[in-house]
Image (cartoon, rainbow, N blue to C red):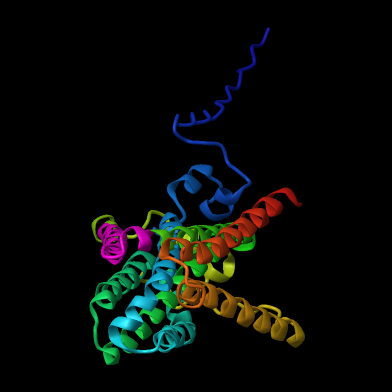
Amino acid sequence: CELKPTRLEVLPLRPRRPPFETKPSSGRGARLGGGDSSFAAMGHGTGVHNAVFVTNFLRGVTIGVLGASSLHIAQSCGVPQNYFIAARGVGLTLGPLLFARPIWRVVWSGNSQLFLALALAVMALCEVAIPRITVGALLYPTFFVMGLAMATIDISCDVVLTTVHREKCSVPLNIINAVYGLGGMIAPHLVVAAPRHVWDLLVIANLSLAVTLAGRRLHLGKPKGWKMKIRGTSPELKAREDPEQGRGDATPPLLEQEKPPLRVLYVGFAFIFLAQATETAMSAWGFTFAVTALGQPPSVAALFPSTFYLFYTSARIVVVLASTWLP
């Protein structure tokens, strides 16, 4: 009989998965990190995502402290209270016009840590100067710069959250507003309890956060995987990569979006104007009104802005819970 030679087929061995490697995921990690869910566990690529919430809490405390201290500041400098509050408002208004595009470029280039640290440091310098200024001419530019710093912080936090969470940014945006209201709620009572030291506490808090962010950036560099997480992996963004340098274009793309109807835009402007006017009136003049017009002691006057921010924060919490329950 004839023996036919047998053909041995060698099947390729499937490599074993390392113990630390996870299976591909269809969630955000897969969308931004090439299918590995462990990519999402490395952070959000900005280096300031968690600091955004702390920053907004300190932002609320600063507004509350300013509102409860503005009467004393006006009396010490001999200037009307509404003048330096208006100077801060001018800075808050011009800030978005001056820094909106630069902030988006900063986030796009992975330098959010240094930029937010700089804004916090400027805020701390203003907080050092305000309780020590006795000349009205110096008070106005200080409040103007503070308004610019506040606007920069506000825009930076909004851009970071919308860049990270994209279409699901409504919940984190409401959360930062809630922690802002929490800061505004407790701030008047801090002024009553420690009127001579509350500004110094704000300086220490803002500078500590600024030094932490800048120190991490200088020591560790940009966050791991920042480019993939911030810029994504779409073909349009890949086309912007420089093949020779191996790095992305520092100029962010201008996304074309459908413009809202003008009537919606105008109604939105009117609502924001009224909302900001109401919030400024309560935060900046609620304490003063209770002391001067109603003759209330400071401990009772602190309840006026604090009660406003209590309902302000409660409404945000309701919105966050409702947005998580609704489909």
Specify the quadrant of the image occupied by residue 261. Answer: bottom right
Secondary structure character of the magenta stretch overall: helix
Residue 81 percent across, percent down from the top left: 41, 84
- In depth, the one of 138 and 147 nearer the eye is 138
- In depth, the one of 231 and 98 nearer the eye is 98
User: In which quadrant of the rendered image does the N terminus lie?
Assistant: top right
Residue 46 in view, yes or no: no
Q: Is residue 229 left or right of residue 77?
A: right
Q: Is residue 241 magenta?
A: no
Residue 277 percent across, percent down from the top left: 57, 80
- In depth, the one of 92 and 187 nearer the eye is 187
Q: What is the number of callouts on the image?
A: 0
Q: Residue at x 26, y 62 (%)?
A: 197
Q: Is residue 322 above or below residue 97?
A: above
Specify the quadrant of the image occupied by residue 65. Answer: bottom left
> Which residue is the extreme one toward the front?
295
Q: Residue at x 60, y 18 (%)?
A: 5
- In depth, the one of 175 and 238 nearer the eye is 175
Residue 265 percent across, percent down from the top left: 70, 83
Q: Is residue 205 magenta?
A: yes
Q: Residue at x 58, y 54 (%)?
A: 31
Residue 48 in view, yes or no: yes
Q: Residue at x 31, y 63 (%)?
A: 202
Tell me where the magenta segment starts and ends, as one range. 190-215
> Which residue is the extreme one toward the top?
1
Q: Is residue 293 above or below residue 13?
A: below
Q: Is residue 97 above or below residue 129?
A: below
Q: Is residue 222 left or right of residue 160?
A: left
Q: Is residue 50 left or right of residue 118?
A: right
Residue 322 percent across, percent down from the top left: 71, 53
